């Protein structure tokens, strides 16, 4: 489903036509303007209109609909397709959660597709709308900000995992904790979290 759609002119959000074709035409005609449409787990039918109006590449569209993609960047004739894997750390359960964000960048448009609940998109849009000078740089500023927020979260999660590792090491080498079932369970859980984190970040290194 579409969760947000707006035209940005001179770095500021403006009211525009509800029709996607009219909105895109307006953004291109005005200059220094672009349209940003955000979708959450769209169905093929919901995405058909967006695909048609923005001329998105079929292979990229297939990836965006299916999800479960590795982080990547692909260039097409007149557009750019980027897949990012945001991560978050749930302190109460010591669990790393991941999501997926697909970003299409083209002539005067940004299309973002989100899968899962882990995503920086709402925060990024809000922050950019408070910074018109940054937003005036257009679609590339949006992509940069999404990638920057995603990497910031990687660093935060890495710090949390380091803390968990130090606690686990202390437990393993304590006189009474090394052989307990609880310790074995924590080791298994930690290995799973490292694997999840690695899957999100390995192709970016």
Image (cartoon, rainbow, N blue to C red):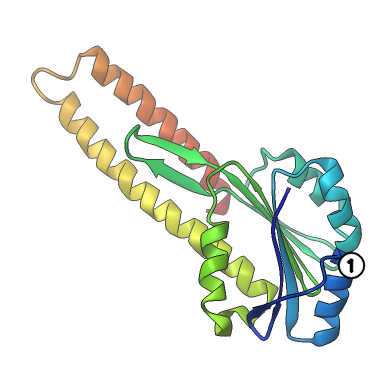
Please tell me which residue is depicted at 37% across the width and 48% down the height of the picture.
Answer: 158
Badge count:
1
Residue at the outermost left position: 175
The answer to whether residue 77 is visible is: no
- Residue 170 visible in the picture: yes
Residue placed at 25% from the left, 43% from the top? 163
Q: Compared to 133, does 121 lie above or below?
A: above
State left or right for residue 10 relative to residue 78. Answer: left
User: Which of the pair 167/11 is nearer the observer?
Assistant: 11
Horizontal and vertical percent position of residue 72 = 66, 52
Percent of width and height locating residue 109: 77, 69
Label 1 environment density (alpha carbons within 10 Å; few <14, some 14–19, many ≥20):
some
Location of mark 1 (residue): 21
Name the foreground residue: 54 vs 201: 54
**Could you say whether the residue bearing mark 1 is in a helix, strand or loop?**
helix
Looking at the image, residue 88 lies above or below residue 109: above
Q: Position of residue 146 (x, y in %)?
A: 57, 62
> In terms of image quadrants, where is residue 69?
top right
Q: Position of residue 74 (x, y in %)?
A: 74, 57
Residue 187 location, quadrant: top left
Quadrant of the image occupied by residue 80: bottom right
**Image vertical order of residue 43 relative to residue 111, above or below:** above
Foreground residue among 179 and 141? 141
């Amino acid at each position: 489903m579409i969760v947000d759609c707006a035209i940005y002119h001179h770095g500021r959000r403006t009211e525009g036509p509800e029709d996607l074709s009219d909105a895109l035409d307006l953004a291109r005609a005005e200059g220094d303007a672009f349209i940003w449409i955000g979708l959450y787990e769209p169905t093929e039918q919901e995405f058909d209109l967006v695909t048609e109006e923005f001329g998105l590449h079929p292979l990229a569209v297939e990836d965006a609909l299916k999800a479960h993609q590795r982080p990547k960047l692909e260039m097409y004739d007149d557009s750019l397709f980027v897949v990012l894997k945001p991560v978050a750390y749930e302190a109460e359960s010591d669990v790393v959660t991941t999501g997926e964000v697909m970003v299409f960048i083209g002539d005067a448009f940004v299309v973002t597709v989100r899968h899962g609940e882990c995503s920086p998109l709402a925060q990024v849009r809000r922050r950019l709308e408070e910074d018109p000078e940054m937003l005036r740089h257009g679609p590339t500023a949006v992509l940069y900000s999404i990638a920057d927020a995603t990497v910031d979260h990687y660093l935060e999660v890495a710090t949390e995992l380091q803390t968990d590792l130090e606690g686990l090491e202390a437990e393993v080498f304590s006189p009474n904790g090394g052989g307990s079932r609880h310790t074995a369970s924590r080791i298994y859980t930690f290995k799973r979290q490292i694997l999840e984190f690695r899957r999100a970040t390995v192709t970016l290194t």
